[in-house]
Image: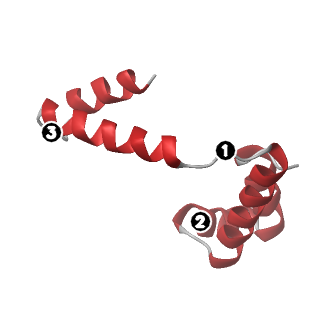
Amino acid sequence: MIRQYLKAALQSDYRLPPRDMGELARAYLGLLRQTPACGKGEKCAATAAYVDGLLTNGGPAVDSMKKIIGPEKTARLVRAFMYGLE
């Protein structure tokens, strides 16, 4: 899977020499190996905390949606559709 993303990145407008992409991929995968696994409950709690912060502090997409559909519908959309929390 990562190979597809690296290949797409190499073919995009933003080009890096293949050696640099390989180093980047190795560094990223090394970090993934060091990251402790979490259970489904922990992941849901972390995702919920992130979404709460996003809705509270805003961001370009969230702010735009709040203006268009209102804060309640935005919260439902972000929680349920974007992050699968509801």
Q: Position of residue 70 (x, y in %)?
A: 76, 68
Secondary element type, mark 2: helix
Among the 4 quarters of the image, the one containing residue 62: bottom right
Residue at 28% from the left image edge and 33% from the top image edge: 9
Decide which of 13, 8 is in the foreground and name it: 8
Q: Nearer the viewer, residue 7 or 31?
A: 31
Q: Which residue is mark 3?
A: 16
Number of the label disc, if any, that sits on residue 62: none
Q: Amino acid at mark 2?
A: Ser
Give the secondary structure at mark 1.
loop
Relative to 18, say whether 38 is above or below: below
Tally of numbered discs? 3
Callout 3 environment at 10 Å: few (<14), some (14 to 19), or many (20+)? few
Q: Amino acid at mark 3?
A: Leu
Judged from the image, the secondary structure of the residue bearing numbered disc 3 is loop
Q: CA distance from mark 2 to mark 1?
A: 34 Å
Q: Is residue 85 found left or right of 37 in the rendered image?
A: right
Q: CA distance from mark 3 to mark 1?
A: 31 Å
Q: Position of residue 15 (x, y in %)?
A: 15, 38
State which quadrant residue 53 falls in.
bottom right
Percent of width and height locating residue 10: 21, 30
**Could you tell whether 79 is left or right of 22 in the image?**
right
In the rendered image, is residue 57 in sight? yes
Give the mark nearest the N terminus, 3 or 1: 3
Looking at the image, tell me whether mark 3 or mark 2 is earlier in sequence order: 3
Is residue 58 left or right of 40 when viewed as pictured? left
Is residue 80 rendered to the left or right of residue 17?
right
Residue at image mark 2: 64
Mark 1, residue position: 37
